[in-house]
Amino acid sequence: MRKIEHRTWICLLIAGLLAAGLLVFIVLFFKDGGQWASASFNRHLYSSSGSLLSGRLLDREGNVLSQVEDGARVISGSAEQRTAMLHVTGDLQGKIATGALTVFADRLTGYNPVLGAAAIQAGGGDVTLSIDSDCQLAAWRALNGRKGAAALYNYETGEILCMVSAPSYDPLNVPDNLERDPAYEGAYINRVLRASFTPGSIMKTVTLHAAMEELPDLFDRTWTCTGSTQIGGELVTCTAAHGTQSIGQAFSNSCNCVFGQLAVELGADTLGRYVEQSGLTSSYSVDGISTTPSSIPLEGLSEGQLAWAGIGQAQDLVNPLSMMVYMGAIANGGRAAVPSLIGRDGASLIPGSWSVRRTGTLIDAGTAETLAQLMSDNVTYNYGSSRFGDLDVCAKSGTAEVGGGQNPHAWFAGFVRDEAHPYSFIVLVENGGGGSAAAGDVAAAMLAAAA
């Protein structure tokens, strides 16, 4: 009798394990079934060169970026257009890991859990991206052969309209010396999503954000800049002797002396808390593509090093997309949409299921409103509002020293205060020199095309 009871328990255990295994399989089937269907071992979906033989890739206007012709995958457009779109569209060899042809392979097959292989056999599905090809080309041309990144997105819907990374190349005419020529160094990397750089003065937006909420008398105080100051044994220098300034004037002048002092007054713990709150050190998921988080190490720094960190130097490294999202949160009252490359009419399993994902609160609404006005003043008094036409642009430039005898990186980060054009943007020109001049011109070209 005991032997029968023992066997009964063993059978029940086996049945339980089978049921649990079936449940796990069902969950994984609905979660990862598309990836299984589009995996490289399904050779009927791929050409001998490894390119997917299913589905069309379109931009937001319905222009074909890539399709299958005569049994082969092709990438559409002129050589310049293909080069500008490389890090969005991807290539035929899968070298661009974040390209749509690789990331959205399951969507391009047309696979869904209900129809399964039937959809694939019918020729796959179209995937419509949020990208504006005209805006993309305008940003590429404005970079004019320089290394860097430029991106613009709708901070209300999350749709990315532009995402340029340079250097790039024509995916249909890959240079023979691509992996040896320094001019193409990092060409496989999407600098918007998967890289980080010394930010320079665009970091002062975060330092000011913290100071506005932690120092009650901030707007009643003045500082005197003589062109340099000693902080914790470090000599912090400015581009000029700015004289006596309010905080608004110090921000407009991008005064290193004032912002270095503010960083030390706030302290590493407080400044670090605001860096984290701003979302800079978070990794965003752009339709399944994980971004590289920014790295702003503050713990254990001397006062002098902390001063430089608050200015955007020291060991600070910022991911362009995370700064663009933070700009969107300032524009949008504290929260912004999480960026997406799939357009509203993209390849959803359920038509009309497109939805907006939002960040948490990256900045208090009242702080955001005040900071936005200070950034608007930057444009009016320093950068030139006329270069942006009728758009109400708020921005902060950055000139990031990178050492080694190289020219500094040029940054321009900001947003448009306009219900008809709810855009935030980020531009980096590597070794471009002055932020407002080099990166600001790229931003202006990108915004003109998007508007």
Image (cartoon, helix red, strand yellow):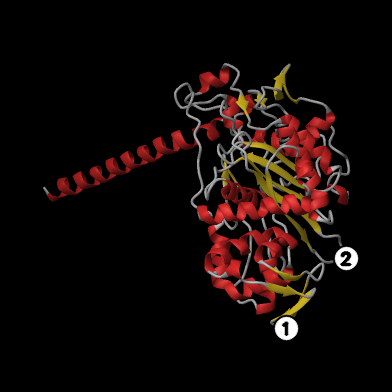
**Is there CB contact under 8 Å for labels 2 and 1?**
no
Foreground pick, 215 / 443: 215
Q: Residue at x 65, y 27 (%)?
A: 60
First-in-chain label (2 vs 1): 1
Residue 204 lies in quadrant: bottom right
Q: Is residue 318 above or below residue 310?
A: above
Q: Is disc 1 placed on a helix, strand or loop? A: loop
Foreground pick, 21 / 133: 133
Q: Is residue 344 visible?
A: yes
In the rendered view, does 193 fall on the left or right side of 185?
A: left
Q: Is residue 195 visible?
A: no
Please state which amino acid type lies under the numbered disc 1.
Gly
Nearest-to-viewer mark from 2 and 1: 1
Label 2, label 1: how far apart the Cα atoms are:
24 Å
Please state which amino acid type lies under the numbered disc 2.
Gly
x%, y% of residue 18?
33, 40
Viewport quadrant of the C terminus = top right
Foreground pick, 191 / 378: 378
Within 10 angstroms of label 2, few (less than 14), some, or many (20 or more) residues?
A: few
Within 10 angstroms of label 1, few (less than 14), some, or many (20 or more) residues?
A: few
Q: Is disc 2 placed on a helix, strand or loop? A: loop
Total tally of numbered discs in the picture = 2
* Residue furthest out toward the left: 1
Q: Residue at x 75, y 62 (%)?
A: 253
Q: Is residue 26 above or below residue 359?
A: above
x%, y% of residue 85?
75, 34
- Residue matched to label 2: 405
x%, y% of residue 373?
63, 52
x%, y% of residue 221?
62, 71
Residue 64 lies in quadrant: top right
Give me the disc on residue 233.
1
Q: Residue at x 58, y 61 (%)?
A: 209
